[in-house]
Amino acid sequence: MAKQDIEALLLEIRQLRDGPSTPEARRRFQQILSRGPSLAVARVASIIAASGQRDLEKHLVPAFDRFCQNPLKSDKGCQGKQAIARALLELESAQGGLFMTGVRHIQMEPAFGKPVDTAAGLRGLCAMGLITMSHPAAFDEAADLLADRDPEAREGAARALGHSGDDRAASVLRLKIRAGDEEERVLDACYRALFSVSWSSGVDLAARQLESPDDEVACRAAFALGESRRLEAIEPLQNAFVTSRSRQVRAAAAGSVAWIPGDEAFNWLVERVRSEPGPVARELLTAVATQLVDEGRRSELVRIARRREDADLTSALVAFEDREHVP
């Protein structure tokens, strides 16, 4: 289809979007799904999901199958298949066959340098679809996807396992965290998923990871605990700040405590600034300077530090003051 024809079709779709349930719109959507280009199908799929037209779901599946045939030509960038999978997820559709096809689909496309797999996001979406519909192969497929060569797919697998709310996901998530990943976002997703399906298992593993001799491993665990915003995360972070020999890990632990809301976390920061030796208090202040966003609490820490009249705290106070003057 010529570029100008595609642009005209997309304009038509935008005009139909305001009345997606009219007979005219529904008829046209069916026509586009049956033979339209992938970009147009992607737009229509999104409209169908947003308007909740479940009876049009049956037309999405053949469109997906069509784009699996000669996909580099019919669905460049995998945009049509991804939009369809996302729409079926939003419609809570139990399309096990489609999701099984999508979770294993690889689409290598020419790019500058090596070919690029454009189906990584699709695999993650389809893993979520299998989990959502409680497909019997859902956990096996998601576990396999955690070893995918593309980080986007691995991250999608972690999100899917976290969405399951099932304790069975905890073991495979623990294994993945212990094995590590070159992409921080994948490990972050695994921690979030593990905390979601089993907080006790997650905090136990994070506490153990905080003791790792590898600073990157320990810091990742600290950040994950802080990001959880849960009060139960305070104790392992406090212990890491007190016992770790690594300045990097202590800084990550203190900064992560600052993310946790409530008085317990803040009172611990106050007590550390008030009572720790100057170099240690300076280390803590520097760590939380960019993490503690509540201006009232920031000001209180600054007042306590200034009362000590300790030269070791001067540089840390400058970091706080610089943050306070950021517009």
Image (cartoon, helix red, strand yellow):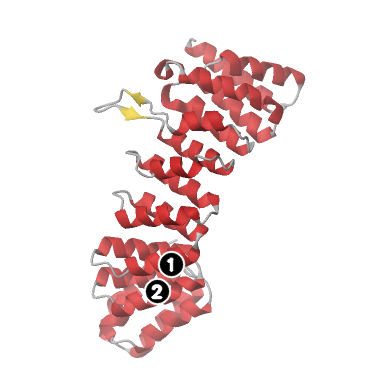
Q: Is residue 21 above or below residue 311?
A: above
Identified by mark 1, the residue type is: Val
Q: CA distance from mark 2 to mark 1?
A: 8 Å
- Determine the residue positioned at 54% across, 29% down: 97
Name the residue located 48 percent from the left edge and 13 percent from the top edge: 3
Side of 319 where 170 appears, left or right: right
Q: Are marks 2 and 1 in contact (CB under 8 Å)?
A: yes
Residue 274: x %, y % from top left: 38, 87
Residue 101 visible in the current orientation: yes
Residue 60 vs 131, above or below: the answer is above
| Vertical side of 269 occupied by 6: above or below | above
Residue 63 x %, y %: 56, 20
SS at badge 2 = helix
Quarter where residue 89 is shown: top right
Q: Which residue is mark 1?
A: 203
Residue tagged 2: 236
- Visible in this render: residue 226? no
- Judged from the image, the secondary structure of the residue bearing numbered disc 1 is helix
Q: Amino acid at mark 2?
A: Pro
Where is the C terminus found, in terms of image quarters?
bottom left
Q: Nearer the viewer, residue 145 or 317?
A: 145
Q: Nearer the viewer, mark 2 or mark 1?
A: 1
Q: Residue at x 60, y 24 (%)?
A: 60
Which comes before the other along the chain, label 2 or label 1? 1
Name the residue nearer the viewer: 81 or 198.
198
| Image location (x, y in percent) of residue 189 | 43, 52
Q: Which mark is residue 156?
A: none
Name the foreground residue: 140 vs 221.
Answer: 140
Q: Is residue 265 shown left or right of residue 20?
A: left
